Amino acid sequence: MLVFAHRGASSHAPENTLLAMEKALEQQADGIEMDVQQIGNELVIFHDRILSRNSNGTGLVKEHNLKALQALDLGEGQSIPTLWQVLNLVNGQCLLNLEIKDVTDVSLVICNIERAVSELAFNYTDFFISSFDHHFLAKFKALAPHIRIAALTASKPLKYAEFAEQLGAYSVNVDMCCLDENFVQDAKQRGLKIMVYTVDEAKELLKLKEWQVDGVFSNSPANALLVLRG
């Protein structure tokens, strides 16, 4: 089972920051999950629509320009990084799950990945593009069929993972609160990988291992790896 650092190793550093990414690499996570938003012609890594929860800023993220966003304090000397800054830091050392939060220009994501493969130590198979916006995923898949997509859900659809299969997704990424063994079996019968967020409790990790889930997203990858692999 793959272990992805959720927003970096977010139990050990401010989420979605370069420090959180460094901690994830130190903890030997199989992959890192991060949240992507568009500001003008740049992609930044930040989860919320609103700045106040984990920065000293106020208002909506999209109301600010890149310079103003990067001047904010996220704690421990950290600021909001661009996607390219994270790509440079990771440089092919692990898998990356880019969760699309607020991006209108699909080509910006594709261009960043193409550049990472060309200039850094990444392969296309190192990337997963996930989103709750299935329209975005459909557009992305049409433009870049060689890059894996992962369809997110925080619900238990009547036909389980059918929506992900229709999108041509590599995996279906499911909220732990909505998961049962039938969902896992349905995804596997459709030829999909199934990954689960956000899982930190040892009992839940071991249950998912028993169900043969393919990956989990954890705030503390070191702890998850210890539970799963001893």
Image (cartoon, rainbow, N blue to C red):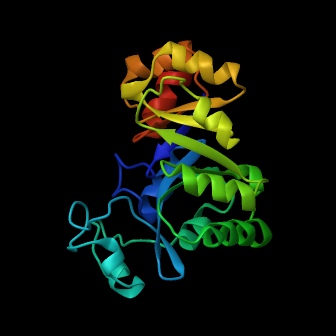
User: Where residue 197 sits in the image (x, y, percent)?
Assistant: 44, 35
**Does 83 appear above or below 159?**
below
* Foreground residue among 9 and 199: 199
Residue 9, compared with residue 64, is above or below; it is: above
Q: Position of residue 59 (x, y in %)?
A: 22, 73
Q: Quadrant of the N terminus?
A: top right
Which sits in the foreground, 54 or 160?
A: 160
- Compared across the picture, whether 47 is left or right of 139 comes to left
Q: Quadrant of residue 195?
A: top right
* Residue 146 image offset from top left, x and y in percent: 79, 53
Number of marks in the rendered image:
0
Residue name at image x 38 percent, y 85 percent: 65
Residue 211 falls in image quadrant: top right
How far from the left and from the top, in percent, is residue 6?
44, 46
- Quadrant of res 135: bottom right
* Residue shown at 41% from the left, 83% from the top: 66
